Image (spheres, grey):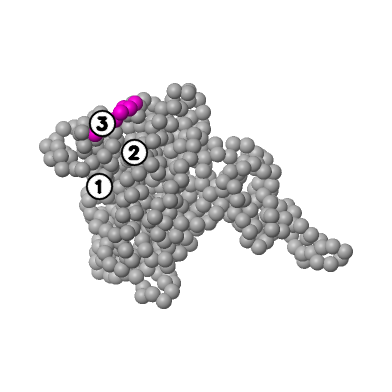
Amino acid sequence: MSTSNSSCHEAVVHGPLSHKTPRTWPAEGYTRAPYWVYTDPDIYAQEQAKIFRGKAWHYVGLEAEVPDVGSFKTTYIGEQSVVLTRAEDGSLHVVVNRCAHRGNMLCRDAFGKVKKLYCVYHAWNYNLKGDLTHAAFSHGLRGEGGLPKDFQLSEHGLHKLRVATLCGLVFATFSDELEPLEDWLGDVAQGIRRVLHKPLKVLGYDTQRIHANWKTYHENPRDSYHANILHTFYGTFGLSRQSQESGMTLDKSGRHVYFYTKAGTEKKSEDFDKTSAALRSVNNDMKLEDPSILKWRDEFGDGVSVQVLTTYPSFVLHQIANSLATRQLIPRGVGESDLVWTYFGFEDDDEATTQTRLVQANLAGSAGMISVEDAAVCEMMQRAMADGQSGESFIEMGGKTLESGGTTKLSERAIRNFWHNYRLDMGIDLDLA
């Protein structure tokens, strides 16, 4: 993997950009992100094809969300509506939520249970694997109408995606060439196995609309050093501080990352004391009327109080104290995105453990005492970028290369790696001479 930041050549975005002048990337490469990449509708359209329908595995749900034969869940990969189903043999399938006849949406409900997938427009019927089983009036009436004699049901099924599971998570991809899921995740898969070590049960959902480009949020959980700076709750009450034992792991491609912090492991230093004294997020006068939300049990036996794991381009798994959740990022246009939170526990949780998880769920989510600030910052960024015609992010905390910063959380290494992979997928020439 090259780490050079040579500025010998101009980085150019390939592909149609309608009538606009071709965009150029800053010569510094992945240590910069030009603001037009967050605001240009043509770039957004290319992302749908090259990233969301390209070579990437996308989270679509939990196995626990489709527990029985006929269970289905509708969700999105990018802007494309898809359906997750469980077939008669117990297998899981993901199909594009679009009838093969005239493109009508098949499933409108978020969840349900059916014997078949049925199009209300012209009564084309599909089994739970997406195969066409019946087309109304295909033989016509009284010798008139009907489909051509060479019409074959087997040739007109739904668009099927590849599906893979890991520890109760379900992923799908449009690509037939992408490596298997666990190979794609690499070392970051160990962060999933650490948390999801038992059968899961769903506790609830929360969906928020963020008025910002999807990439502003995708960068956020990859940004391991903002937590102690932005979040008053973390810094004040000690769930996550830079002075605590922590670390970060990326897969070899740099697409995926997780980081962890161990509360109660403070290492005193003059540098931290000087910095924290100037942070707005450290407020020693703040008190909790009910401090029980801070009580957590080390259920994994490793002292980790916070683990946040992100896979490219739109999935997050978090453990914040005893709160467990997935986050699915869904683009809704160049300047908007949805974040779907799914809170869960384990099937063998007792009532006290479930209540603890539900109480601590208030730390995250759209109104969470921690997470509410993340969405707010994304929206502030989008407003500040304006039309994106000027300006760029500076991404050199921890160094200038894909490796610099190592495993420390005090780094933007994971963000540099995101932009490196983004540029590869989007076909932007890399200044790596």
Element assignment for label 2:
loop
For the N terminus, which image quadrant?
A: bottom left
Looking at the image, is mark 3 or mark 1 nearer the viewer? Answer: 3
Q: Main secondary structure of the magenta part?
A: loop
Query: Is residue 379 in the magenta section?
Result: no
Tag 1–tag 2 contact (CB < 8 Å): no
Residue shown at 48% from the left, 55% from the top: 78
393 left or right of 334? left
Q: For mark 1, what is the residue?
A: 411
Element assignment for label 3:
loop
Looking at the image, is mark 1 or mark 2 nearer the viewer? Answer: 2
**Among the two numbered marks 1 and 2 on one chain, the one whose residue lies closer to the N terminus:** 2
Q: Residue furthest front?
A: 289
Count up the numbered dots: 3
Looking at the image, is mark 2 or mark 3 nearer the viewer? Answer: 3
Element assignment for label 1:
loop
Q: Amino acid at mark 2?
A: Met
Residue 232 quadrant: top left
> Where residue 220 sits: x, y (%)?
33, 49
Q: Any mark on residue 287, and which?
A: 3
* Vertical placement of residue 261 versus 172, above or below: above
> Where residue 65 sits: x, y (%)?
55, 39
Q: For mark 2, what is the residue?
A: 369
Q: Amino acid at mark 1?
A: Ser
- How many angstroms separate mark 3 from mark 1 (CA)? 30 Å
Question: For the magenta stretch, what is the residue range?
Answer: 286-292
